[in-house]
Image: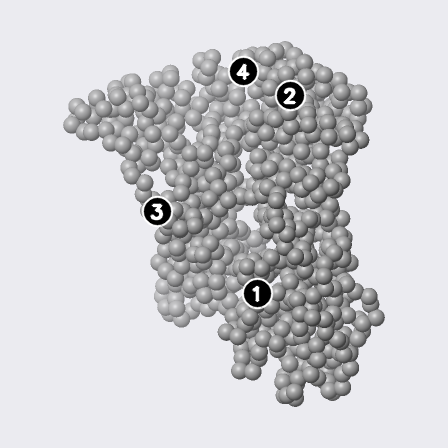
């Protein structure tokens, strides 16, 4: 007999707060097994007599829900797409990043417009602005617009073989009670008799009793069997259930399976997956994936999403911290376009957010802003404080003082308080026309009205006064800034150092440099300014010492500017030996030598019958290769073209990680000659994402670490796992727990993880492994963490050692253990690891 059923989507997903790692599981009301295929409607028979003697009854479970009125899953037909699709190409060019856009990365829409980036009151408002509750509740509305489909599952009493009925009933009882590894073994033991229909019955039963992850594991086992044939109804049901539980990783896997079969997922699957991503915005990359699925939903599926989904995605987009503002604007415009073309109501927040995004761009499109304002007025919305502040920002960028003053009066008329950012924008407008006195007056007014200046206010007024070289005012303001206890001070010290250099006040510059090192994180920019000053006054000996300090500190490091400046000093003073050393270093690092210096070098080297050589050809050094292996193990991505002849490395760092903040500067300099021209940014404004040039040289790494566009662990990883590679793997994707254990993150197959574990074991380190989703976590505990640290310490960046170093007592125990190991059994006989063991993270 055939069982049909339906599921109720009225249950809402739970939003995970950033302060909790717990996941709320949504309950589903089910009257019977859901139907998802395009087969004809089948009649239900609810009688059951053969399974009374079993410890549980599937029929009893079904009948307990039969009183509820439920809806069926359905499928929409595919419509042609006539809407422009804003998506990222796999071969996209890295976006241009400027100083202004770097400053814009520090806050969200609400924070920038209300000026509460530095206050605690703004956090709740920003969080409420990205709520997705309405989109969750709207899932039920999606289901009412679809045609009922069925998934064909035979009842146990319909099976002619009694032994098959008994075995299936036994499997339905046993499968949900086992973990992944045991479950696979259990199913493998039944391979001789299990068919597609049997496995489908087990998977659907698991979903019916809300064991959706177990159902997913059964489905994954099914796909590996030679008798498996794709069942659209089953995978749609599974994807929807996983998505409603916010298991977005597994839901996306099933979603991709549908796409790989050349089928278009149902509207509910698209909707649920987008909501699942939006409910997990604390996880890195979820917003980007939500946008990608949303775009496919419209272009590929031809669906018309509900208004709640448009609004939720838009609000999450403009509430995001950081990111490339140009990409955010394109996606926001795409959402706005779809809301308008489908005849849905455009809410006030959509207009406000779009105007804000336009005001954040390097080149402000005033015509577009004015059009949005007109549309906003036609819709009956009055311009709020957020809109007026956005206008203030847009006008200030072009120095439109008259427009800024007019907008300022509009802001005062609103009588809702002036945000701190409005003062900053007004100061910027007057700085554009060179009226520093008015800018200072605005700053003092800001202090008076807000009870004290903000960090951004101090940064802006010091920058303005440094440009007009008002030394006394600047020094007074810097002293006030330091006494206020606000941070960071580094941007202001950089501006002051530049001013001292331009004025020739080299002694004051040196004092500012020393104070900066005492109070701020070391910066390559401040070092370069000081180095320029030493070269200019002819103190080449001290300049050489500072240059060596930069070169030996991986956090700071040297760049083309510092090399050219010191080379110029040596050439001008006739120090040929030192000049040749800098020249050799620049050739090794592939830095471009300034044309005037090339002429001088040509003359000097010609006297020694040497020829000035161009930078070496593109080839990764041994150090770069080892660093790349470590980063790839940590999750670095490689993007390939369609023919797989050219490959591009995507360097991506987390904004909320102090280790990544330090590491990105070092990696950018380490691979400088390999970076795309648009990724060679100005100093100290390196973004958290940049790209290498497309090159065939990366084909080796793409083939071994990213075959078929997915992360994989090479078979020969044990040969490439050097201490240098391990150090960068740890710095990029590892962390130290409060108990001193070291945790390493790894993606790949189980076999690949075993190779890594064996390689660590061969280095006298025992480790434990835990799998969560597609990610493996390798843990080194106790003395093993200290052994690992002793191995990699010489290659860890100096500024990260305190952050990553295990407790000293563990290191002492590790030294003792090493002595014992050397005098006893071989390593292979002592250490043991278990992939099934659980590690508390």
Q: Kindly check if marks 3 and 4 are in contact, taking CB atoms under 8 A apart as contact.
A: no
The residue to which callout 2 is attached is 395
Residue 495 is left or right of residue 534, and the answer is: right
Instruction: Determine the residue positioned at 51% across, 27% down.
Output: 516
> For residue 94, which numbered disc appears in the image?
none
Instruction: Determine the residue positioned at 18% across, 29% down.
Output: 610
Near mark 2 (Cα within 10 A), the count class, few <14, some 14-19 or many ≥20, is many
Q: Nearer the viewer, mark 3 or mark 4?
A: 3
Name the secondary structure under disc 3: helix
The answer to whether any part of residue 290 appears in the image is no
Question: Quadrant of the rendered structure where residue 265 is?
Answer: bottom right
Mark 2 to mark 3: distance in Å?
47 Å
Mark 1 to mark 4: distance in Å?
59 Å
Q: Kindly check if marks 2 and 3 are in contact, taking CB atoms under 8 A apart as contact.
A: no
Question: Quadrant of the rendered structure where residue 624 is?
Answer: top left
Name the secondary structure under disc 4: helix
Near mark 1 (Cα within 10 A), the count class, few <14, some 14-19 or many ≥20, is few
Task: Give whichever of discs 2 and 4 has the lower sequence position.
Answer: 2
> For residue 467, which numbered disc appears in the image?
4
Mark 2 to mark 1: distance in Å?
58 Å
């Amino acid at each position: 007999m055939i069982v049909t059923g339906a599921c109720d989507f009225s249950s809402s997903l739970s939003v995970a707060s950033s302060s909790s790692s717990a996941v709320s599981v949504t309950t589903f009301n089910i009257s019977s097994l859901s139907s998802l295929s395009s087969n004809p409607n089948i009649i239900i028979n609810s009688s059951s007599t053969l399974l009374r003697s079993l410890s549980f009854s599937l029929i009893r479970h079904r009948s307990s829900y039969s009183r509820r009125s439920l809806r069926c899953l359905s499928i929409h037909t595919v419509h042609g797409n006539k809407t422009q699709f804003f998506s990222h190409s796999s071969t996209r060019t890295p976006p241009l990043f400027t100083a202004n856009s770097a400053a814009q990365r520090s806050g969200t829409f609400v924070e920038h417009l209300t000026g509460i980036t530095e206050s605690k009151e703004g956090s709740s408002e920003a969080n409420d602005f990205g709520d997705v509750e309405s989109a969750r509740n709207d899932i039920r509305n999606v289901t009412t617009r679809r045609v009922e489909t069925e998934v064909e599952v035979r009842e146990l009493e319909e099976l002619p073989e009694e032994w098959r009925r008994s075995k299936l009933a036994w499997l339905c009882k046993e499968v949900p009670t086992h973990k992944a590894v045991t479950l696979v073994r259990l199913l493998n033991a039944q391979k001789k008799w299990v068919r597609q229909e049997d496995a489908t019955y087990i998977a659907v039963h698991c979903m019916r009793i809300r064991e959706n992850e177990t159902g997913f594991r059964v489905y994954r086992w099914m796909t590996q069997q030679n008798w498996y044939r794709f069942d659209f109804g089953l995978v749609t049901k599974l994807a929807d259930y996983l998505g409603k539980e916010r298991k977005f990783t597994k839901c996306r896997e099933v979603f991709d399976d549908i796409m790989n079969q050349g089928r278009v997922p149902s509207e509910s699957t698209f909707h649920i997956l987008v909501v699942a991503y939006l409910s997990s915005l604390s996880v890195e990359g979820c917003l980007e994936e939500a946008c990608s699925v949303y775009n496919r939903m419209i272009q590929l599926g031809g669906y018309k999403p509900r208004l709640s989904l448009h609004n939720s995605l838009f609000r999450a987009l403009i509430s995001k911290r950081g990111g490339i503002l140009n990409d955010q604007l394109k996606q926001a415009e795409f959402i706005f376009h779809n809301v308008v073309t489908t005849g849905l109501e455009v809410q006030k927040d959509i207009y406000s957010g779009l105007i804000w995004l336009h005001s954040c761009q390097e080149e402000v499109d005033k015509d577009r802003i004015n059009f949005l304002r007109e549309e906003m007025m036609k819709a009956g919305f009055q311009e709020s404080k957020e809109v007026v502040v956005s206008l203030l920002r847009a006008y200030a960028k072009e120095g439109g003082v008259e427009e800024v003053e007019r907008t300022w009066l509009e802001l005062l008329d609103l009588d809702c308080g002036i945000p701190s950012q409005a003062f900053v924008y007004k100061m910027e407008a007057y700085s554009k026309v060179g009226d520093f006195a008015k800018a200072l007056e605005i700053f003092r007014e800001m202090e008076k009205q807000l009870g004290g200046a903000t960090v951004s206010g101090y940064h802006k007024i010091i920058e303005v006064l440094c440009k007009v070289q008002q030394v006394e005012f600047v020094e007074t303001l810097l002293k006030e800034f330091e006494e206020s206890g606000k941070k960071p001070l580094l941007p202001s010290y950089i501006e002051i150092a530049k001013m001292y250099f331009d004025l020739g006040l080299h002694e004051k510059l040196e004092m500012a440099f020393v104070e900066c090192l005492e109070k701020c994180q070391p910066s390559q920019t401040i070092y370069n300014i000081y180095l320029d000053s030493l070269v200019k006054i002819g103190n080449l000996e001290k300049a050489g010492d500072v240059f060596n300090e930069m070169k030996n500190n991986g956090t700071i490091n040297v760049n083309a500017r510092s090399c050219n400046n010191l080379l110029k000093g040596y050439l001008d003073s006739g120090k040929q030996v030192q000049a040749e050393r800098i020249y050799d270093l620049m050739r090794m690092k592939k830095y471009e030598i300034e044309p005037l210096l090339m002429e001088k070098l040509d003359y000097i080297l010609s006297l020694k019958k040497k020829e000035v050589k161009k930078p070496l050809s593109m080839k990764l050094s041994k150090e770069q290769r080892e660093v790349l292996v470590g980063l790839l193990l940590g999750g670095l991505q490689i993007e390939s073209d369609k023919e797989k002849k050219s490959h591009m490395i995507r360097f991506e760092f987390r904004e909320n990680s102090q280790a990544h903040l330090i590491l990105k500067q070092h990696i950018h300099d380490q691979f400088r000659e390999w970076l795309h021209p648009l990724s060679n940014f100005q100093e100290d404004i390196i973004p958290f994402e940049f790209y290498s040039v497309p090159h065939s040289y990366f084909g080796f790494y793409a083939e071994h670490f990213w075959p078929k566009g997915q992360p994989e662990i090479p078979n020969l990883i044990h040969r490439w796992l050097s201490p240098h590679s391990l150090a960068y793997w740890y710095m990029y994707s590892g962390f130290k727990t409060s108990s001193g254990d070291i945790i390493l993150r790894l993606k790949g197959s189980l076999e690949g993880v075993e190779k890594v574990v064996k390689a660590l074991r061969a280095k006298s380190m025992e480790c434990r492994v835990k799998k969560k989703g597609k990610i493996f976590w390798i843990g080194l505990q106790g003395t093993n963490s200290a052994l690992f640290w002793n191995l990699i310490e010489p290659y860890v960046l100096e500024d990260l050692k305190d952050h990553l170093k295990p407790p000293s007592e563990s290191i002492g125990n590790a030294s003792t253990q090493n002595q014992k190991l050397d005098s006893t059994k071989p390593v292979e006989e002592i250490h043991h690891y278990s992939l099934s063991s659980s590690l508390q993270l």
